[in-house]
Amino acid sequence: MDQRIDIDWTACEGHGLCAELLPEHITLDEWGYPLVDGTPLPARAVKRARRAASDCPVLAFKLGTSHEGARGTARSAPTGPRMTERLHRP
Amino acid sequence: MTATFPDLHMSPRLLAPGATPADHTTHVRRYGPLAYGDPAGLLRTLAESGLTGRGGAAFPAYRKFVAVADAARRTGRAPVVVANGAESEPASHKDRTLLRLSPHLVLDGLQVAASALGAEEAHLAVEDGASWLEAALAERHDPLPVTVVRLPRRFLAGQASALARYVSGGPALPAHPDPPVRERGVRRAPTLVQNVETLAHLALIARYGADWFRAAGTPAQPGSALCTLHVPGHEVRVVEAPFGMPLSRLLPLNDTAAVLVGGYHGTWIPTPQAAQLPLDASTLGAGVLAALPVDRCGLTETARVLRYLALQSAGQCGPCLNGLPRIAAAFRTLAEPGPQGATRDDITRWTGLTQGRGACHHPDGTIRLVRSALTTFAPELDAHARGLCTATDPTPLLPVPQET
């Protein structure tokens, strides 16, 4: 199951710990809030992402298995081939 | 006061003729008794009708109903239905007009929705006119009692998750969209939040069927929508018009420079382009159409609206809290003739940083307005950079509530 980073923007206070743990996936914007690319995490980063989720002082950093946006779209995982392709991307 | 001319463009479906409020007796005489039918049959009819939400997102109503029904089955909890009459958009008058003239159509729709979903709780949420609606409720003998909820006057109070939180006894503030309201809404029950106009259409679909509904509009976008028309020099009007109707038939476009389609989360479109466009559910938002006369400055109008939108941020999400006030302040600079420095680049960067990074639509809708203004009013932007403004009438046009 692919894992995606999901930020609860109502909770995030820009502490920035997630960017320190996952520098290749998260940078901070000019106000200190995380910029996430939204693609599934590669397997090698999942452990650090779990750490980021548990270390986030306000528990705003979440790991989801779906790409649930604010758009009211139905929950759906990406299709198999696309997911594999993304997981294997260097 | 809103003048209504419901029969101007099609035979009226939703608004009582003559702009006279319809009591329950008049309502039943006009539309006939309400038919509930069996829930499965109603859901089928709803699917065939192609009805989409009239609150702005144009999401298929059937899909929302099914998602709520599925969540109810999964969790074993009876759903809650909420009629959303918040209409916190200052330029929109259609929901309050509908609730004043045809309250029973909305209340019918709410009962139909509740019956189709097996809901055990129903609410009608409004900013204004709560007593009027309570009086309308007292005229009826509904199977499910309805509570009228008085909402605080905030732009985001009508956002579905904010509404669900408020009805649950919490603050009227948007929540993180996972889990969604349709799965866990009012007091954690699967919750259907549907705009009041959507429910009024549903009440008619339940009576007359999907084919009747599809007789108006286009095959891809069936039905009609209530629109709030802002035409300079005229009273604000609410009209019902079918999708696919040319915008130019709804709004006189002579001596206008641009049209705001879809309200304050919508899009500025230059008049020559707008004149070619039909009424389209994907851009109509909650139905606000406003014409900008050639003697007004679109940048000044947009700057005023942006300041209001920035102040209406719930202040919960960092990118929205930081981005919108900066964008609004920078846009004010662009609205003044004079040197612009790096202001346009700043706005481009901040809109990029704010888009898609919030719990609700507010940042994205605001950025849509910003980007369309920068494109549509590009010649005026250049004039401003040279120290000129082509507008001659500084009177504010678009309604923005006074700051308190």
Image (spheres, helix red, strand yellow):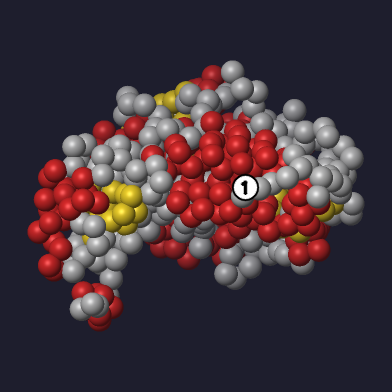
Residue B267 position (above or below residue B136): below
Chain ID at mark 1: B
Quadrant the N terminus of chain B occupies:
top right
Q: Nearer the viewer, residue A67 or B141?
A: A67
Left or right of B113? Residue B346 is: right
Q: Position of residue B221 (x, y in %)?
A: 58, 65
Q: Position of residue B17 (x, y in %)?
A: 74, 40
Q: Quadrant of residue B173?
A: top left
Q: Quadrant of the C terminus of chain B?
A: top right
Q: Is residue A52 above or below residue A3?
A: above
Depth order, front residue of B277/B396? B396
Disc 1 residue type (three-letter): Thr
Q: Residue at x 24, y 51 (%)?
A: A19
Q: Which residue is at 83% across, 34% downward?
A: B394
* Relative horizontal placement of residue B35, taking residue B167 as reference (left or right): right
Does residue B209 appear anywhere in the picture? yes
Residue B183 sits above or below residue B399 on the image: below
**From the viewer's perspective, is B53 left or right of B331?**
left
Q: Residue at x 29, y 44 (%)?
A: A8
Q: Residue at x 31, y 29 (%)?
A: B168
Q: Give the residue pinned by disc 1.
A: B343
Looking at the image, can residue B4 be seen?
Answer: no
Query: What element does badge 1 sit on?
Result: helix
Percent x, y of residue B177: 33, 47
Mark 1 nearby-residue class (10 Å; few <14, some 14–19, many ≥20): some
Q: Position of residue B186 (x, y in %)?
A: 31, 35
Count of marks overlaid on the render: 1
